[in-house]
Image: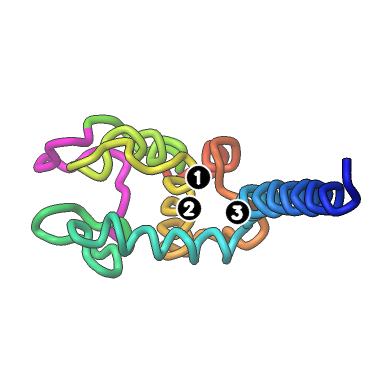
Amino acid sequence: MSNRRSRKMYSWMLTSVITVAMTAVAATSHAEDTGPEQAAQGGKLFSDHCAKCHGAEGQGTKKAPPLVGKDALPLDPRPSQKVRKGQFHTAQDVAQFASTKMPPNKPGSLTTDQYYDIIAFALKANGVDVSNKKIDATTAAAIKLH
């Protein structure tokens, strides 16, 4: 193999390794988000996927109940609710519901991390301290709502 060809191959291999490494870092960096970062990402996702029905601040509209505020996430579904049938004892109950029923036009269309980001946003907006933890299935199950 010529010296020139060896350098090209080395250059290509080095570029490939760097690309794979950068992709791995990008993929894991969100997984390490905690508290404020996760809630901020959840706020962006909420704006994109939830605000149309639940209101810009999660205050609720005629189309959907509030997710933020004193009337948000009651234990029992409201009599007028068509989609929700179960109780919300923990934040994990909310996550289970959201990941299988929301958004109504494309249920389950977000990633698991995206649903938990939105849950982190809603929890923080409702005064739950999420600053030292990543919201996931385990931590959401430990957050008692009622």
- Disc 3 residue crowd, few under 14, some 14–19, many 20+, Cα 10 Å: few
Question: How is the rendered protein coloured?
Answer: rainbow
* Residue under label 1: 113
Give residue 30's mark: 3
The residue under the point 45% across, 56% down is 123
Give the secondary structure at mark 2: helix
Q: Rounded to the nearest whole Å, what is the CA distance between mark 3 and mark 2?
A: 10 Å
Q: Position of residue 49 (x, y in %)?
A: 29, 55
Q: Earlier in the sequence, mark 3 or mark 1?
A: 3
The stretch of residues the image draws in magenta is 70-84
Q: Quadrant of the N terminus?
A: top right
Q: Name the residue at 9% across, 58% down.
A: 62
Residue that lies at the very extreme toward the front in this rendered image: 2
Element on which disc 3 rests = helix
| Quadrant housing the C terminus | top left
Q: Residue at x 26, y 69 (%)?
A: 56
At label 3, the amino acid type is: His
Note whether 137 is above or below 129 in the view shown: above
Labels 3 and 1 touching (C-beta < 8 A): yes
Q: Which mark is residue 127?
A: none
Separation (CA) of disc 3 from disc 1: 9 Å
The residues bearing labels 2 and 1 have C-alpha atoms spaced at a distance of: 6 Å
Kind of residue at disc 1: Asp
- Horizontally, residue 102 falls left or right of residue 89, namely left
Q: Is residue 138 left or right of residue 106?
A: right
Q: Nearer the viewer, residue 121 or 45?
A: 45
Q: Is residue 94 above or below residue 125?
A: above
Question: Residue 101: image x %, image y %?
Answer: 26, 36
Residue position for label 2: 117
